[in-house]
Image (cartoon, rainbow, N blue to C red):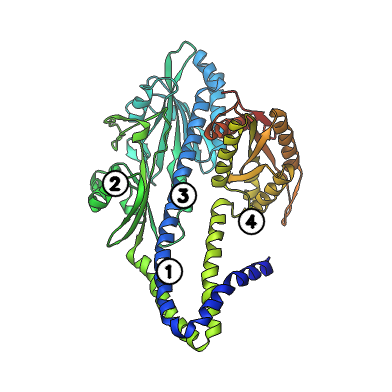
Amino acid sequence: MTSLKSENLIKKSLPLFLLLLSGLGVLLAGVLVVFFQMQVGNYERALIEKEQHSLNLQRMMVRNHFATIVGDLLFLSKQEGLKAFLQDPSRSNLDFINSEYRSFSASKKDYVQIRYLDSNGMEVVRVNSDNGQSISIPKAQLQLKRDRYYFKDTFNLDKGEVFVSPFDLNIERGKVEEPYKPVIRFATPVFDQSGVKRGIVMINYLGQDFLDIFMEISPENQSQIMLVNKEGYWLSHPEVEKEWGFMFADKRHVSITREKPEIWKEILSCFSGQLVTSEGVYAFTTVSPLDSQCISSEGSGDAFGSSDQNIAADEYFWKIISFVSKNALSSPLDKLKIYLFELGGLLFLLGAIGAWFLAETFTRRGLYQTQLVNMAHFDALTGLPNRTLFFDRLDQSLLLAKRYDRKCALLYVDLDGFKSINDTLGHTAGDELLTVVGERMVGCCRTSDTVARLGGDEYAILLTEVVDGRGAEVLAKQVLAALKAPFFLKQQEAVIGASVGIAIFPEHGKTADQLVKSADMAMYSSKGEGKNTYTFASFI
């Protein structure tokens, strides 16, 4: 591989080397000046493009994350255990709901609370996730929430509508909980079989996990990444003391609206773009994570305050802002000036060596840009297509399936028992296991199929063309058998399983989001049925 890369580099560099060598004596100074100006322009353009690309990835991540949470919420609101309790509020039915919520919470570590509240706002069931443990709260510790804005706003909704709260800090017993717990509350009303509204089901999503993921895919340079709500308050900022100003009476003035009013005005007026200022470059984009069935409100920073008004899905948005200071922009270019001055002297004395080095620098830069594109589309650990490339291929497959009136299938695979491997053998063994899992899945598939790692221990397999569900079922059995076999890791042998959800286009979804959501819900049904099995999605 190294030999091939070297040969390719030499082949691509040779014409430029000969050109530079022939005119070196006369044109050296001019070439270096032109080269520097080109590098300045390319560097600035590449930097802005990289920032914008990262922001777009973050925006896609947020939308996909929200769609998953809303799907989980609607799934909980339709569970049989809850329906049975609404008909017969017996102790056994109540215990059954608690058990269901604990199981669901155990598989979703970032759901800090799962609750069912009755029509009076009283918590009937609450399961907390605390340090990886799912705990049912005793009846004596359940709280009355009828005066909280999120209960009022949710209880006023119609069937099938979802309330998504503003991103704020959790409040317990009238005070902001410390240490701070950023949360987003997802809730929907619950109706009994007679159509009577009986309460709400709510998920408190631990926003810190979301912010951590958000920062993990931020550009790896000197940029400052900020997440700002529609009112101009920072939800994430390099200076943590500037965050969550709207939650505290003495910090209401701490916002980008007050500190950078003209810049905020420009950012607020556009969906995405760049602003070049005397301070540096701002790149920004807008995240509107809610689907049409979702409703939010202005919320309230006060413990028992009411929302000022409801807001529609398209009015619920954040701004992701990346700022690169003038110093950060100029620092690499200053270094480049010095480097080219020294290089000029070397080229003058050692023409052939200097000319070759310059040609190689140009060429290596182009190859590096190609490598960056590959890094943006493939998982760094397993080498499999990542979420971005997977959704691109899924969209293309759906377009071809619609055009040629054929079917395609999606398998959503979640590993069973992976956490225990990480906990007992360590993350190095976990990474090794994830890589071998990907290899085994690829070995089960056709070359035309796509095996992707969506994140963590979640994988997806796209079958671009199937006659019916039987082909997907055969593949699911092969995958389950392959993953059930022991894994001989460097440390010791490990055994895991998998839960598989199968969705067929167009029976289980006519869009990429519908198909993924259907497969995801089917996968959770497999987990509910005892894991290490597969389940077909329900018809839409």
Three-letter amino acid code at disc 2?
Gly
How many other residues sit within 10 Å of disc 3, few (<14), some (14-19) or many (≥20)? few
Whether tag 1 and tag 2 are in contact, CB under 8 A, the answer is no
What residue is pinned by disc 4? 428
Distance from the alpha carbon under mark 4 to that under mark 1:
40 Å
Gap between marks 4 and 2 measured at Cα: 40 Å
The reply to whether residue 483 is visible in this rendering is yes
Name the front one of labels 1 and 3.
Answer: 1
Above-or-below relation of 337 to 375 = below
Along the polypeptide, which appears first: circle 1 or circle 2?
Answer: 1
Corner quadrant of residue 182? top left
> How dense is the environment of label 2, judged by Cα within 10 Å: few (below 14), some, or many (20 and up)?
many
Q: Earlier in the sequence, mark 4 or mark 2?
A: 2
First-in-chain label (1 vs 3): 1
Quadrant of the snapshot with the N terminus? bottom right
CA distance for labels 3 and 4: 21 Å
- Give the image location of residue 408, x and y in percent: 64, 33
Residue sitting nearer the eye, 306 or 298: 298
In this rendering, the count of numbered labels is 4
Discs 3, 4 touching: Cβ within 8 Å: no
* Numbered badge on residue 39: 1
- Quarter of the C terminus within the rendering: top right
Label 2 element class: helix
Secondary structure beneath disc 3?
Answer: helix
Query: How far apart are the two marked residues, 1 and 2, measured between alpha carbons?
Result: 41 Å
Reading the image, the residue beneath label 2 is 245
